[in-house]
Image: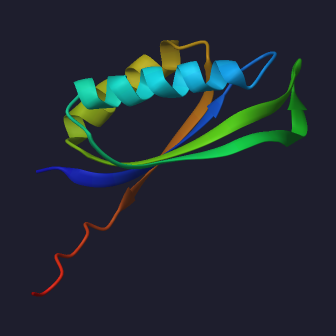
Amino acid sequence: MSNRYEGLFILNVKGSDDSAGVVIERWTKELAAEGASIEQVQRMDRRKFTYAAGDLASGYYVNFVFTLEPAALLRLKAKLVLDEDVYRSFFVRLPLKKAKAA
């Protein structure tokens, strides 16, 4: 059974924010390849960190809302750890949407 998730990605885009679009597009395709049904992609722009993380002082925040199998989410997390363009990722399980009564 699929679960509904919200995933916050903090992207490590050094330079222009145009490169963030390429990374977002790549991860949108990666989610779809894992079988996710994407509801929403919210670009929240670049934000400064409260505390500097080494030489990284800011990150580009992107929020995904999607439905996916739990096993596929584990595979996705493993891929995110290896991606140098993703600084951090956080996932929260959301309640399933209720169908509207006709």
Q: What is the x, y in percent for residue 44? A: 67, 47
Q: Residue at x 66, y 18 (%)?
A: 19
> Which residue is drawn at the image coordinates 33% and 30% (left, top)?
31
Q: How is the image coloured?
A: rainbow
Q: Quadrant of the C terminus?
A: bottom left
**With 92 as the anchor, is 87 left or right in this view?**
right
Quarter residue 75 falls in: top left
Residue at horizontal 55 percent and vertical 21 percent from the top? 23
Please say if 94 is above or below 88.
below
Residue 12 seen in this snapshot: no
Left or right: where 88 falls relative to 48: left
Q: Position of residue 50 (x, y in %)?
A: 89, 45
Question: How many labels, in total?
Answer: 0
Along the horizontal axis of the image, is 86 left or right of 54?
left
Asked whether the viewer can see residue 55, the reply is yes
Q: Residue at x 40, y 30 (%)?
A: 28
User: Residue 51 or 20: which is nearer the viewer?
Assistant: 20
Residue 61 position, x and y percent, is 66, 40
Give the quarter of the image for residue 93: bottom left
As drawn, 58 above or below 65:
above
